[in-house]
Amino acid sequence: MISIFQAIIIGLIQGITELFPISSLGHSVIIPKLLHWNLNQGQPFFLTFLVATHLATAIVLFFFFYKEWVKIFQGLGRSLKNRVIDKTDTYARLGWLLVLGTIPAGILGLIFKDSINKLFASARIAAMLLIVNGLVLFTAEKIRKTANQKQLSSSKTDEQIAKLSFPKSILVGIGQAFALLPGISRSGSSMAGSLFFGLDNYAAARFSFLLATPIIGAAAVLQLPSIFSASERPIRTAILAGAISAAIAAYISVKFLVRYFQTKTLTPFAIYCVLAGIVYTIILTV
């Protein structure tokens, strides 16, 4: 079904591409096809495997931003206790922005789950959507440059994010929901939406990473029973190997990207997605 070696490679790819705005699902579908691995990606076992790697990534993100999550939970607690969301309470507002931003992908994922799962078997569709993802990133960068945004210090970033309105957070969440399609990046789409609504690259990346934790974690937890089902027993070692690989890659990726987006832009990732999407489409078509 899937060997330990294949699991490690796909896990590493997932851990990197989940946080880099270049689509983890797209690469998880495309790369095995390019390597001519005999994997039936339309089968439940492959989705179960991907769920495990995503859970590992979510755990890494949670602990990487552990201090921020403690403040967010405390802020949510204050707002519930006082029955009001104070505009000056940065982490209470940030917490509710994350809650609202998570809802669209959760609802759409449940509604279209079966239809979306069928796309995992089509590497060609994933390659074409990768091109679309690149164009979205190009557009987001153009909007950011037109707005002439100034980079804030890291100490002011959470305050900047908390100034987003609740409707805008929902719209960012809707953009994130498009990442249910293999080839569209979750981090890329949520960053693009954040840039469109006025955040700078660093704040958009930070909001994207925080937003990733609940949606990835919730989706993975819902699928946990399948990991421990009798039908998946033959690949549990592979699942573990893939999850560990994804966790290691995710930690290195988020550590790099947090620094990268303090001064750099989405443009290199946009170029990669367009060129890679074109090349992959040609290879998979020939």
Image: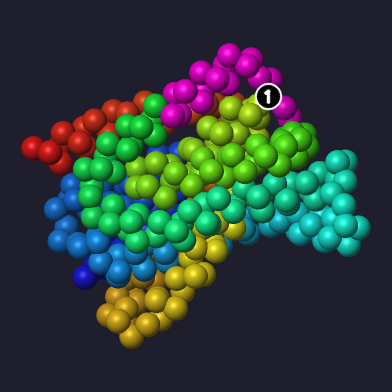
Does residue 21 appear to the left or right of 254 in the view shown? left
- What's drawn in magenta, residue-wise? 136-153
Q: Is residue 67 visible?
A: no
Give the x, y percent position of residue 267: 45, 24
Q: Is residue 124 left or right of residue 255?
A: left
| The magenta stretch spans residue 151 | yes
Outermost residue on the left side: it is 286
Q: Is residue 284 above or below residue 92?
A: above
Report the amino acid beneath label 1.
Gln
The front one of 119 and 17 is 119
Q: Is residue 99 visible?
A: yes
- Residue positioned 88% across, 62% down in the render: 81
Locate residue 272, reporting x and y percent.
35, 30
In the rendered image, residue 225 lying in the magenta stretch gets the answer: no
Residue 205, quarter of the rendered image:
top right
Q: Quadrant of residue 135?
A: top left
- Which percent across, then down, holds residue 244? 43, 65
Q: Residue furthest bottom?
A: 230
User: Is 177 drawn above or below residue 163 in the view shown?
Assistant: below
| Left or right of residue 253, residue 113 in this image | left
Residue located at (65% from left, 26% from top): 198
Label 1 element class: loop
Extreme residue toward the right, this view: 82
In the displayed structure, 264 sits above or below 280; it is above
Q: What residue appears at the point 24 percent right and 60 percent down from the top-left corner? A: 41
The kind of secondary structure the magenta stretch mainly shows is helix
Q: Nearer the viewer, residue 204 or 13?
A: 204
Position of the C terminus by quadrant: top left
Q: For the point 30% across and 70% down, which residue is it?
A: 45
Q: Which residue matches tag 1? A: 151
Q: Quadrant of the N terminus?
A: bottom left
Residue count near mark 1 (Cα–Cα under 10 Å), binned few <14, some 14–19, many ≥20: some
